[in-house]
Image (cartoon, rainbow, N blue to C red):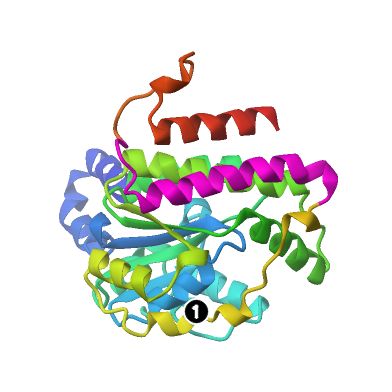
Amino acid sequence: MLSTPQRLWQVLKSNPQREESLLTETADIAVPDDRGLFVIGAARSGTTVFQNALNSSPEIFLLGEPALQDDPGTPDFAARYNAMHRSWGNQENKSSFCPPLFDQDAPWHHYLARLARHYRYVGSKIVVNPHEAARTCQQLFEFHCRYFYRSHYVFTFRNPIDVLMSTRGLAELNGDEAAGYDTVLKSFLQVMALYIRFLRNLPSVRAVFHEDLGEAVLRDTDAWLGVDLGEAAGYYDNARVRRYSLEQVPEHARALAEEVIAAYEELRGQVAGGMRLVQLEQNSNHIDPAHFTPLGNLHRRIEGLLAAS
């Protein structure tokens, strides 16, 4: 899909007389990319509660799972988006309802641009589901580099065993076919790899971990964004979080699960330590393990697990 500037340039080349009217038509649909804010994570990794916590700020408006990278850009966005959330049984709030900001419906980018008049940050929650995770991650990287390069990104992570068992349990509860154990674990690795890719290539990227979320992490996020998240901590209630153990994973998937847990704990440790030497170029084919930085070694480990599993 061509961007708005590309479409405008094509029309102007073919019909220069339309320049003034087209500039007027498109003036309301450009979202400054540094005003974007996106929460990205694997399914069941805490994206929803973190989005709700951010949306508690009067300066933030995040849509819930609009899948903008797949959206056709047709002028019926609110109708489609709101119908989707109604079908899921969601009550109306910032996360689940696109307000009627125009006399008629409009494409998604019109809504984000109009919301940006009222909020300091606009964007969405993005969930990477197990099926086609590799394709989704590639789409997300290309889409956000193209349209929201300077936006703020927060990746949410949760213990991979909790993600695995919760993802499968929710599918079974809804009467759906649950994704295979290896499929869910590999999608978790894909999101880890996507976080590293965003971190190395886009300017404002962070990670939070569900197990660590509390007032300290939220205060740090508050300072990073420069907004008031004073009510955000109230959205977290550890008593409502279900925990799982490795023993609940079937034997055939346990070896991969142990590898993913080790990679996850390494990621948590590196983020806590400040993610040093992010921009040091590494060659994954180097034969000397001492060659790699901690992040380079983690990236190599993830690549190996995805290639082998």
Q: Name the amino acid, label 1.
A: Tyr
Side of 150 where 141 appears, left or right = right
Residue 95 spot, x, y in % from top left: 48, 76
Side of 190 where 114 appears, left or right = left
Give whichever of 209, 191 is nearer the camera.
209
Check the image and report above or below for 288 versus 107: above
Side of 30 where 168 appears, left or right = right
- Residue 219: name its quadrant: bottom left
Check the image and report above or below for 272 versus 306: below
Give whichever of 73, 232 is nearer the camera.
232
Majority secondary structure of magenta residues: helix
Quarter of the image containing the C terminus? top right
Secondary structure beneath dot 1 equals: loop
Write the residue at 67% across / 56% down: 161
What is the tally of numbered marks visible in this picture?
1
Q: Answer whether residue 107 is visible to the viewer in this image.
A: no
Residue 69 spot, x, y in % from top left: 48, 51
Residue placed under numbered mark 1 in the picture: 236
Does 78 appear in magenta? no
Write the residue at 21% across / 70% down: 226
Residue 240 spot, x, y in % from top left: 62, 80
- Residue 24: name its quadrant: bottom left
Write the residue at 31% across / 67% down: 221
Quarter of the image containing the N terminus? top left
Q: Answer whether residue 243 is visible to the viewer in this image.
A: yes
Check the image and report above or below for 49 versus 259: below
State which region is magenta: 250-278
Does 270 appear in magenta? yes
